[in-house]
Image (cartoon, rainbow, N blue to C red):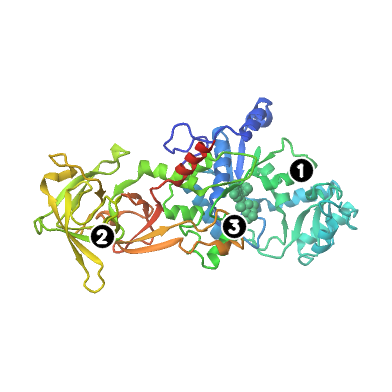
Amino acid sequence: MVSDGHKPDNGRSGGGLPGNFIQDIIDEDRRAGRYGGRVHTRFPPEPNGYLHIGHAKAIVVDFGIAQANGGLCNLRFDDTNPSKEDPEYVEAIQRDIRWLGYDWGDRLYFASDYFEQLYQYAEELIKRGKAYVCDLSPEEIREYRGTLTEPGRESPYRNRSVEENLDLFRRMRAGEFPDGSRVLRAKIDMRSPNINMRDPVLYRIQHTAHHRTGDTWCIYPTYDFAHPLSDAIEGVTHSLCTLEFEDHRPLYNWLLEALEIPEPPKQIEFARLNLSHTVTSKRKLRQLVEEGYVRGWDDPRLPTLSGMRRRGYPPEAIRMFCEQTGVTKTNSVIHISQLEHCVREVLNRKARRVMAVLRPLKVVITNYPEGAMEEFEVENNPEDPAAGTRRVPFTREIYIERDDFLEDPPPKFFRLAPGREVRLKGAYYITCQEVVKDPDTGDVIELRCTYDPASRGGETPDGRRVKATLHWVSAAHARPAEVRLYDHLFLTEDPDEGGGFLANLNPESLKVLTGCLVEAGLEDCEPGRQFQFLRHGYFSVDPDSTQKRLVFNRIVSLKDAWAKIRGQQVKAR
Ligand code: ATP
Ligand code: MG
């Protein structure tokens, strides 16, 4: 767990966010002596869905900037809209942020905790002649607002007296009026070129119970009203958000100025993170979950933090990815293989290598004594000497990968074939002597091979070379397993291309292989544990896994498409 003021311990030297424009603003604020040199940020999720990779970016920026400056970052639930929010999300969001490696200390806040204070600020605005109660219907408000090219019109209720406004606003709070009958609006400028400044709504009547305040309130503040004031209440200095809020900044500043907040926080916008081949809209994610296109919010194909955790992505890889992609002012789409590249980089260092046969083909070693067993010592991770070695049992009957044998091999196929010799990883050289077929189907069901006792440990005294090394498991020791292979959830880089996003779903995003065989010992591993299955990729133990029925998720294959794409980009320059 990382706490404020410390860099995440992600096993890298340097690291962190590269130099960026937000840091420049902070440096300038410090030079000018603003905020007494303090840096205080917040991450403000709305508890109406699960966090996804886009939120991870915001978390890395919000907490990372605070950490890099010896500052603090609050977790604030932006729970001002009671109809869409749920305590289930509040729990999940906290779990996900902790997992990602960030800690808000004792600064867990809810915008709903400020409802009374926010209400008092609203009365203050009314008293200052800067807000009024408007009786236009929502449709009329929209119509009076004007368009980008036409100025708006003033509401006929705009010039109510302070007394009348206070009386009406208090009666709104007291529950005298039905939903939608009245709102509180800021009195700014109906002719402003910025539509957000055309007397925006600050409070709505909504007779809906709130997950934290129950029936205490029937008026709720809008995001635009609650956000700057919540920042001010918490002593936030730099309120970092995404670019779509840029046009709201004048309103953010107007409210703080109208209420004469000393040393007001400043809003700074950065570009959203978008990822190819996936969706990061909460609405679309919810639709995928609720309509059963995936198995739940933690489906390993989703870019949710809970999905990526279940898949086996290490949190440090997600942090590395968010840091690498930097903090910028222009929205862009990052290729998903860049994220996968980070996952491989971390797992290459920390995942233990094991042997697993996903599509088994039986091999009987005819000259190996029946009932005999010997153990070979193999490295757990050549990238990490501290990972040590383990002993792998070898017997007369083993399984190899079905695709590692071809009866009639093409010229470039160097693996096993009739009469050919190959190396079994860490064990012996074997030569295929006979192919046994199912008499009905003609399928190859067994190979009968001989081994060379002089090749123990994978080398021969005569230095004879073979062109392939195969992984294998001992039939008597291997454990049966189910392996879930994932591919991108969408076939197109942009899921919205062409028709709707549902039309671009990849029908083969999940393939389940049963009857796989893995090395003994894996049945004792806790869910989430990651391995490299030699020659196949990185896999994790799924929470569905039990001692009797092992289940693994493929995290990523070994092939690094991003390294290739990047290589091509470099060449193209
Ligand atoms: P909604 O439309 O429901 O508000 P949201 O994605 O903005 O969706 P929030 O819970 O409000 O969800 O987001 C919390 C924070 O995460 C906000 O500051 C938001 O700007 C940031 N955030 C959300 N998506 C991304 C993204 N793709 N890249 C970077 N930051 C993001
Ligand atoms: Mg939002």
Task: Classify 10 Å Cα crowding around label 2: few (below 14), some (14-19), many (20 and above).
Answer: many
Is residue 30 rendered to the left or right of residue 535?
A: right
Residue located 61% across and 37% down the image: 40
Label 3, secondary structure: give it.
helix
**Mark 2 beta carbon near ligand 1 (under 8 Å):** no
Task: Classify 10 Å Cα crowding around label 3: few (below 14), some (14-19), many (20 and above).
Answer: some
Q: From the viewer's perspective, is the residue at label 3 or at label 1 nearer? A: 3
Is residue 485 rendered to the left or right of residue 417?
A: right
**Residue 264: percent from the left, percent from the top?**
72, 38
Residue located 88% across and 57% down the image: 155
Dot 2 amino acid type: Arg
424, 378: nearer the viewer: 424
Label 3, label 1: how far apart the Cα atoms are: 27 Å
Dot 1 amino acid type: Pro
Disc with the residue nearer the chain's start (2 vs 3): 3
Label 1, label 2: how far apart the Cα atoms are: 63 Å
269, 476: nearer the viewer: 476
Q: Mark 1 — residue?
A: 250
**Residue 312: percent from the left, percent from the top?**
41, 52
Instruction: Locate the C terminus and report the quarter of the image it occupies.
Output: top right
Asked if one can make out residue 510 in the rendered structure from this viewpoint, the answer is yes
Label 2, label 3: how far apart the Cα atoms are: 39 Å
Placement of 182 over or under 258, stated as above or below: below
Q: Mark 2 — residue?
A: 479
Is residue 405 rendered to the left or right of residue 269?
A: left
**Mark 1 beta carbon near ligand 1 (under 8 Å):** no
**Residue 141: percent from the left, percent from the top?**
82, 59
**Mark 3 beta carbon near ligand 1 (under 8 Å):** yes
Q: From the viewer's perspective, is the residue at label 1 or at label 2 nearer? A: 2
Placement of 40 over or under 470, stated as above or below: above
Give me the disc on residue 282: 3
